[in-house]
Image (cartoon, helix red, strand yellow):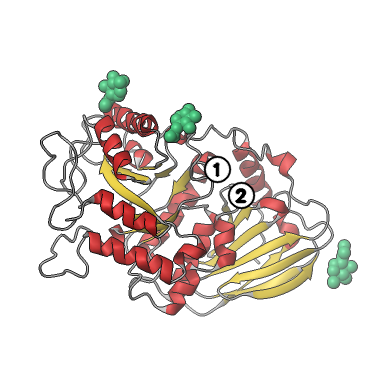
Amino acid sequence: MESPSSLPATVLLLLGLWTARARALDNGLALTPTMGWLHWERFLCNTDCDSDPHNCISEQLFMQMADLMVSEGWKDAGYQYVCIDDCWLAATRDAQNRLQPDPKRFPSGIQKLADYVHSKGLKLGIYQDVGKQTCAGFPGSYGFYELDAQTFADWGIDLLKFDGCNYDTPNLLTEGYRNMSLALNKTGRSIVYSCEWPLYMKVFKKPDYTEIRKYCNHWRNYNDIYDSWNSLKTILDWTAQHQDMIVPAAGPGGWNDPDMLIIGNYGLSWEQQVTQMSLWAIMAAPLLMSNDLRTIDPKAKALLQNKEVIAINQDPLGKQGYQMIKVEDFELWVRLLSKGALAIAVVNRREIGGPRNFVLILAFLGKVWTCKQKCMINQLLPTHKDLGLQNCTSAFDIQVNPTGTVLLKLTAIEDTPLLENDIGTGTHG
Ligand SMILES: *[C@@H]1O[C@H](CO)[C@@H](O)[C@H](O)[C@H]1NC(C)=O
Ligand SMILES: *[C@@H]1O[C@H](CO)[C@@H](O)[C@H](O)[C@H]1NC(C)=O
Ligand SMILES: *[C@@H]1O[C@H](CO)[C@@H](O)[C@H](O)[C@H]1NC(C)=O
């Protein structure tokens, strides 16, 4: 490894991140990041069931995904929420101003769809918007927050993705996100509340993450993901550049949402899919796949269902990881885990050449984590490998392919090497 001379400063800076964790939305949900499937990136606003019945946004699509989530092991791996995004609505509200789904594409109605999804042991998510219209131009929730929250509760909805298009002023954006949160609470039904509040607010002013965490279970900070490495890169870079602001906000009950998993689609190479899965685990991100479970290839499926990697994402300590150093086109990301363990992702950001060697010297992890006596090191991705027992003098060679990632888990064998007391409270009150 090229000498990380900036390491002590970085560590000191990051130790300051955990001083004040705000109270989370008190609905008892999302104590670990939400896992499921969301239609948007793969299926977009396809409303043309006449010429594309197989891929249009219809009740049949969600029933098929629910069936596969059970039969293909997704549910057992932890993926639980089947989520509808924009373009499910009819063009107008009904005579009582209630929302209604497009009658042709959802002929049985949302309540029946929720019953079906529940009968499979899964949960149903739906989409609305804080403004007068959704992003795709369907009726928005503005002026109807309580009525819409009650409609969702009556139907048996379990998650609401609340978009931020078509609002009039930043104040109304803030009030709308707050009011919908209160309206959901008032229904008495447990509904995960997924916000895009900071994404739309940051155009005007720095989002107040203490407040956002109080009202939302997760929140999008940055642009929609596209099916490309370029899109994935910009999300990782934005996250690293803003980690001082966003990492402290994450914890049980409330998470930063870097958007959907696009693994199993067209735009990412194998190495890049490994990078997405590894970094979504390090970032404690909601794992909402947007892909076609009817045709996904076995390699992508195995990656998405990798139990060891999911366990890192779902670690009960609930501390989001961060980028510790960036040197010579390598990025070292770390995440503290429960029971004194540590996850490390080494990303090779060079887009030319072959595998490159990164020397990981455990002593460099310094104050973040120490391997006092002995620790066990396992490589989880791209393939599982036991790297055996090591100590603080250990150094390893890690070969990382261009645009790929090696994900490691370090487990302490003796003592409690995690310097939790130096870092601040491990609880999220
Ligand atoms: C509503 O909020 C109260 C107080 O914050 C909380 O105790 C309760 O569990 C919430 N109910 C729901 C359904 O989220
Ligand atoms: C939010 O709720 C408050 C209190 O009921 C109300 O005064 C305000 O107009 C609402 N704002 C929006 C945007 O609905
Ligand atoms: C660390 O491991 C090396 C090689 O196995 C060994 O020589 C060394 O004594 C160990 N150091 C400590 C502090 O345990």
Type of amino acid at the residue the image marks with label 2: Pro
Position of 52 compared to 277: left or right?
left
- Front residue of this view, candidates 269 and 142: 142
Position in image of residue 133 (x %, y %): 18, 40
The picture quadrant for ligand 3 comes to bottom right
Local crowd size for mark 2, using a 10 Å CA cut-off: few (<14), some (14–19), many (≥20): some
Q: In this view of the protein, can residue 210 be seen by the observer?
A: no
Q: Which residue is disc 2 drawn over?
A: 316
Position in image of residue 72 (x %, y %): 43, 72
Type of amino acid at the residue the image marks with label 1: Pro
Question: Quarter-wise, where is residue 130 in the image?
Answer: top left
Q: Are marks 2 and 1 in contact (CB under 8 Å)?
A: yes
Local crowd size for mark 1, using a 10 Å CA cut-off: few (<14), some (14–19), many (≥20): many
Q: Which residue is disc 1 drawn over?
A: 252
Compared to residue 132, the image places residue 335 above or below, namely below
Q: How many marks?
A: 2
